Image (spheres, rainbow, N blue to C red):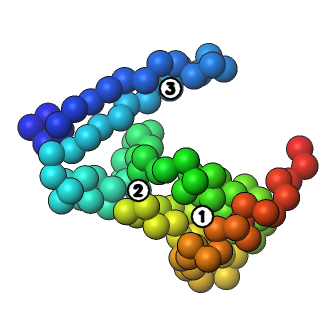
Amino acid sequence: MEDVDIAQRLKRSPNGKKDIHVILRFKSRMTRNRVLRQSKLLRAKGVFVREDLTPLNHEVFMSVKRKMSDEVKSVWSRNGAISYKDARDVVHRVEWEDYQHWLDLPWPKK
């Protein structure tokens, strides 16, 4: 707890899920980066860690994740920069110039 500046628990989601969502603000960027680097280990224990993105970055992140799910294997962000791994395991960084392309793609039909 000495590394956490403030912690806030969010309300339960509208669909009634009982997942606990907590926002943490770390005292140092080094600690935050260390936690983000360990996110794979935490995920194995049922703890999911993600950055708090701006609304635009979050929309682009979700577009990359959902709009071409057959071609995109995984998506992540570090320091606000969005990256993804394609089906051939090649890592790509989503550049600012590509944002509109991802936003303009149609959402998949349910």
x then y, percent, for residue 99: 64, 68
x then y, percent, for residue 8: 32, 26
| Mark 1 closeness class: few <14, some 14–19, many ≥20 residues within 10 Å | some
- The amino acid type found where label 2 is placed reads Lys
State which tag comes first along the sequence, 3 or 1: 3
Q: Which of 107 and 69 is in front in this view?
A: 107
Q: Residue under circle 2?
A: 40
State which tag comes first along the sequence, 2 or 1: 2
Q: Residue under circle 1?
A: 74
User: In terms of secondary structure, where does tag 2 sit?
Assistant: helix
Residue at 37% across / 48% down in the picture? 42
Residue at 37% across / 62% down in the picture? 79
x then y, percent, for residue 95: 56, 76
| Mark 2 closeness class: few <14, some 14–19, many ≥20 residues within 10 Å | some
Quadrant placement of the C terminus: top right
- Classify residue 60 as left or right of residue 37: right
**Residue 70 falls in which quadrant of the image?**
bottom right
Up/down of 65 relative to 23, above or below: below
- Classify residue 58 as left or right of residue 65: left
Whole-number angstrom distance, CA of label 3 to CA of label 1? 22 Å
Q: Nearer the viewer, mark 2 or mark 1?
A: 1
Q: Residue under circle 3?
A: 19
Dot 2 and dot 3 residues touching (CB under 8 Å): no
